[in-house]
Structure formats: C-alpha cells, structure tokens
Image (cartoon, rainbow, N blue to C red):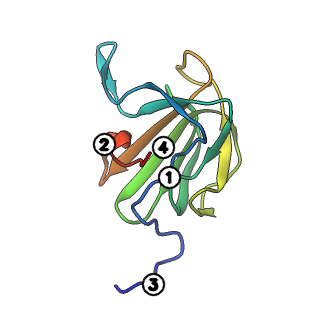
Amino acid sequence: KGTMRLKGEGTGKFAWPVSGAKLTSSFGSRWGSQHKGIDLASSNRSILAADTGKIEFTGWKNGYGNTIIIDHQNGYKTLYGHLKKISVSEGDIVEKGDKIGVMGNTGRSTGTHLHFEVHVDGVAKNPSKYLKR
C-alpha cells in the first residue's frame, strides 16, 4: 500500500478526544452490565476526533444520547456519547484533532462527561489500550 493514505482513512493511532481529561469510569463490568467504553471529564468541553475518518452517524442513540460515530475506514470505529452539541454531519471527513462536538449530559448519564468507545472490526475494545498518555 505504500505511504499513500485514502482520504478519510485513519492511522490506527488515537489521540485523546478531550484535552486535560480525567478518567471517571473504566471499560468493563459496571453496575451488573458491560461498560463498552470509558468516561472522560474535563473543564475543556470540546470533543475532538481521535483519528482521521468519515462521520458514519450523528444523532440520538438510546442510552448514549447525542452521539457521533466515526468510521476510520481501516477496521476501527470510535463512538462519542452524551454530547450537548454535535458539530459535524454524516459523510463529513474529519482529521485527527478536529473539533466534532461539545461534551454534555444527554442520554443515560450521571453528569457532564464524554463516553468514548473504540470498536475493532465491530467488537468493543478497551479504549485505554489505544490512547497514549
């Protein structure tokens, strides 16, 4: 494949979707069910694309509230939930670090935070293993 990347194809290396984020809930079993992502809180409410990709979904998702799903077109997808505001549209190409929304408290949520998921070939994985500190 060489070094050429397709427009909207991610690198597979993820940046933190929130600046100055504090992890408030981990991936795994929580309250008797599987928590498929991590929860991040920060005084900076801007939500950033964790990697380059194409916006696959924007809108309301049960439990998640206002949600964005990015297809990184390389087997990876990321989900951003509980948003107050969505700043992108389905079909948009975003680059890693682009602002895509604003943190909120929509859906099944106990306070303002970002719920962030990483899916690899359709399976939810622990996002902490993909984010570099």
Marked residue nearer the N-terminal end (3 or 4): 3
Q: Give the spatial CA distance, label 2 vs label 3.
A: 27 Å
Which amino acid type is marked by label 3? Met
Q: Where 67 sits versus 69, above or below?
A: above
Percent position of residue 122, x then y: 31, 49
Badge 4 is on which residue?
Answer: 79
Percent position of residue 90, x then y: 61, 55
| Marks 3 and 4 close (CB-CB < 8 Å) | no
Describe the element under mark 2 as helix, strand or loop.
Answer: strand
Quadrant position of the N terminus in the picture: bottom left
Quadrant position of the C terminus in the picture: top left
Percent position of residue 63, x then y: 49, 25
Badge 2 is on which residue?
Answer: 125
Which amino acid type is marked by label 2? Lys
| Marks 1 and 3 close (CB-CB < 8 Å) | no
Q: Give the spatial CA distance, label 2 vs label 4.
A: 12 Å
Percent position of residue 127, x then y: 38, 42
Marked residue nearer the N-terminal end (2 or 1): 1
